[in-house]
Image (cartoon, helix red, strand yellow):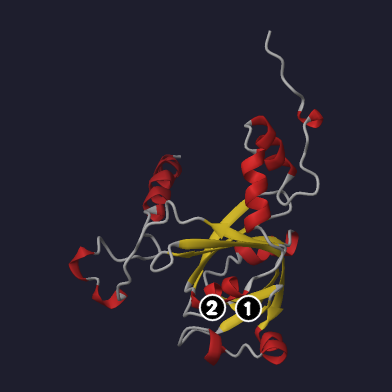
Amino acid sequence: MEQHTPYAALDDGEGLPGSRGEHILQRLFATRERAERFYERQVVDRLTPHMRDFIARQEMVFVGTADAAGNCDTSFRAGPPGFVHVVDDGRLMYPEFRGNGVLASLGNIMENAHISLLFVDFFEDLVGLHVNGPATITTAYDAARRYGLADEDRTAPGRRAERWVMVEVEEAYIHCSKHIPLLTRQDRRERGPQARRPAGDDYFGVGRVRSVAREPEEAGKSTG
């Protein structure tokens, strides 16, 4: 008869980077030795000089947050090289521009300060960088006064940062290049006829789906 080992009885990797869950799975799937080599060689609690230079060259970052209940959201931020500003080896800041007004990422940070940033260079280095840690929200005025982050220096022309997010580095580690595709930069204005259709507010047809869903209800009201 197959016996199952209770999770509580497994070595949870106390003292290692990462979560208890990943340490338990490393034992279950016999990957602990490989994981420990990765932790030892690749995971640091601050930004190395190479990481700082890498971030200064990036034009995009993927932002992962979660609310107090653990509901997750992943968003995308972009700007000119250097739009994510490294304050020092333990802190970095990125701007929040005017958007759709939902403020999902900032709302999650208000409830749960933990944030995950993923920088990926698709064009030259073909490598990624994870940066995890607690985040705080600050005003554009405070960012300019305390850190010299004026819009003219750090944000895209015509876009003003309404606020900034400060991230304190707890973990920083590589995302290997094995499956990162090589992409080619292209001017948005020169896409030409190969573009399938222009992006817009209803690119994914949500408005049509909602209108179809309302039709039976409206028909019922008209015959009532």
Residue flagged by tag 1: what amino acid is it? Answer: Val
Query: Which mark sits nearer the N-terminus, 2 or 1?
Result: 2
- The percent coordinates of residue 161 (x first, y second) are 57, 82
Residue flagged by tag 2: what amino acid is it? Answer: Ala
Task: Say which quadrant the N terminus sits in.
Answer: top right
Quarter of the image where one finds residue 44: bottom right
Which residue, as the protein is rendered here, is positioned at the far left? Answer: 193
Residue at the spot of label 1: 86
117 or 74, nearer to the observer? 117
- Residue at disc 1, secondary structure: strand
- Examine the rendering and report whether any part of residue 161 can be seen: yes
Q: Which mark is residue 56?
A: 2
- In the image, 219: left or right of 118? left
- In the image, 12: left or right of 163? right
At x 47%, y 83%, the residue is 156
Residue at mark 2 to residue at mark 1: CA–CA distance: 8 Å
16 or 148, nearer to the observer? 16
- Residue at disc 2, secondary structure: helix
26 or 190, nearer to the observer? 26
Which residue, as the protein is rendered here, is positioned at the far top? Answer: 1
Quarter of the image where one finds residue 108: bottom right
- Relative height, residue 36 to residue 182 (above, below): above
